[in-house]
């Protein structure tokens, strides 16, 4: 089995794959104060609940945008699974041609999403990830990662509104049903949710035009794929999203693992296995 970690600023999403198929997934809070043992005990309970055995995990892969958590999970992988984790980073084989000015600046989650989306839906396409930040990524039909946009996420906007004002309360992120609101809570919900929907529609519209100009074929259909915890909420109020795919990042990790794995080798002492990966530099 393969254990995949998608580490975001707010949540860690875990997935277990067997023979290329996801058989379990969970979501937990990202906490850079937790030790490898604390995470290990949580994962042990999750496996037990699903009737899975930790000793059946043969490899671990990690994508993270939180560097402080990476060492903890690497230590966890060695201690609890006796495996050196594969970590998504510059140079790893992805099948993408990264056109960013500096490919090393592209977040691991954005690359992983692009790999999965292009494999599942083809190109050209736009991937929107509704996480702590809302990111938009453009990928050509030739699997070129062209670039994108990063905006404050819906939760960040909500927290900023609460923290930076004296009287405005915390609110649930849900549609109020109308924009002419008669109380403060609904007024905030309207501004946050409908404002985010409007931003998404505007950016997707402009990105489609730029992407088709880049591809040189204005007749192509640009698919728009959404993922992340708030994707369903935003998709309910707009028409520009074609597919909501909540497991996109985990599936991308599994695909990248398949591109990079090699036959396991036993070390000279014969008492353990080590995992080696092939790497290639991203081309621009």
Image: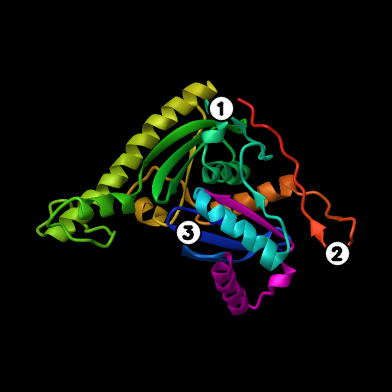
Q: Is residue 62 magenta?
A: yes
Q: Which residues are magenta?
A: 36-64
Residue furthest to the left in view is 182
Q: Secondary structure at mark 1?
A: loop
Q: Which residue is mark 1?
A: 99
Please name which of the two marks, 2 or 1, marks the residue nearer to the observer: 2
Q: Secondary structure at mark 3?
A: loop
Q: Nearer the viewer, residue 70 or 207?
A: 70
Q: Nearer the viewer, residue 11 or 247?
A: 11
Q: Is residue 101 magenta?
A: no
Q: Quadrant of residue 41?
A: bottom right
Q: CA distance from mark 2 to mark 3?
A: 32 Å
Q: Which residue is mark 3?
A: 32
Picture residue at 58% right of the left edge, 79% below the top: 49
Horizontal side, residue 243 vs residue 103: left or right:
left
Give the label on residue 206, or none.
none
Q: Which residue is mark 2?
A: 271
Horizontal side, residue 242 vs residue 83: left or right:
left
Q: How many residues crowd around disc 3 within 10 Å: few (fewer than 14), some, or many (20 or more)?
A: some
Q: Main secondary structure of the magenta part?
A: helix
Q: Residue 220 appears at what percent x and percent y?
A: 52, 30
Q: Dividing the image into 4 quarters, which one contains the C terminus?
A: top right
Q: Residue 151 appears at what percent x and percent y?
A: 36, 40
Q: Dividing the image into 4 quarters, which one contains the N terminus?
A: bottom right
Q: Nearer the viewer, residue 164 or 128?
A: 164
Picture residue at 48% right of the left edge, 53% below the top: 8
Q: Are marks 1 and 3 in contact (CB under 8 Å)?
A: no
Q: Residue 124 appears at what percent x and percent y?
A: 54, 34
């Amino acid at each position: 089995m393969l254990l995949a970690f998608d580490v975001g600023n707010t949540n860690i999403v875990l997935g277990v794959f067997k023979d290329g198929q996801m058989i379990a997934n969970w979501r937990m809070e990202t906490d850079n104060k937790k030790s490898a043992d604390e995470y290990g005990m949580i994962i042990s309970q999750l496996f037990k609940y699903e009737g899975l055995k930790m000793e059946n995990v043969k490899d671990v892969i990690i994508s993270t945008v939180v560097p402080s958590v990476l060492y903890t999970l690497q230590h966890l992988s060695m201690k609890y699974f006796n495996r050196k984790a594969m970590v998504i980073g510059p140079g790893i084989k992805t099948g993408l041609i990264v056109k960013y000015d500096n490919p090393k600046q592209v977040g691991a989650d954005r690359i992983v999403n692009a790999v999965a989306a292009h494999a599942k839906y083809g190109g050209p396409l736009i991937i929107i990830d509704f996480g702590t930040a809302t990111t938009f990524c453009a990928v050509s039909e030739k699997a070129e990662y062209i670039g994108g946009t990063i905006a404050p996420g819906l939760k960040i906007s909500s927290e900023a509104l609460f923290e930076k004002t004296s009287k405005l309360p915390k609110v649930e992120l849900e549609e109020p049903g109308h924009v002419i609101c008669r109380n403060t809570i609904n007024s905030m919900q309207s501004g946050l949710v409908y404002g985010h929907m409007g931003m998404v529609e505007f950016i997707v519209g402009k990105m489609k035009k730029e992407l088709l100009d880049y591809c040189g074929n204005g007749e192509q259909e640009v698919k728009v794929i959404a993922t992340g915890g708030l994707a369903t909420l935003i998709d309910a109020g707009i028409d520009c999203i074609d597919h909501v795919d909540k497991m996109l990042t985990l599936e991308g990790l599994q695909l990248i693992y398949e591109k990079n794995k090699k036959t396991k080798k036993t070390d000279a002492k014969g008492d353990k296995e080590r995992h080696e990966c092939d790497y290639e530099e991203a081309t621009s």
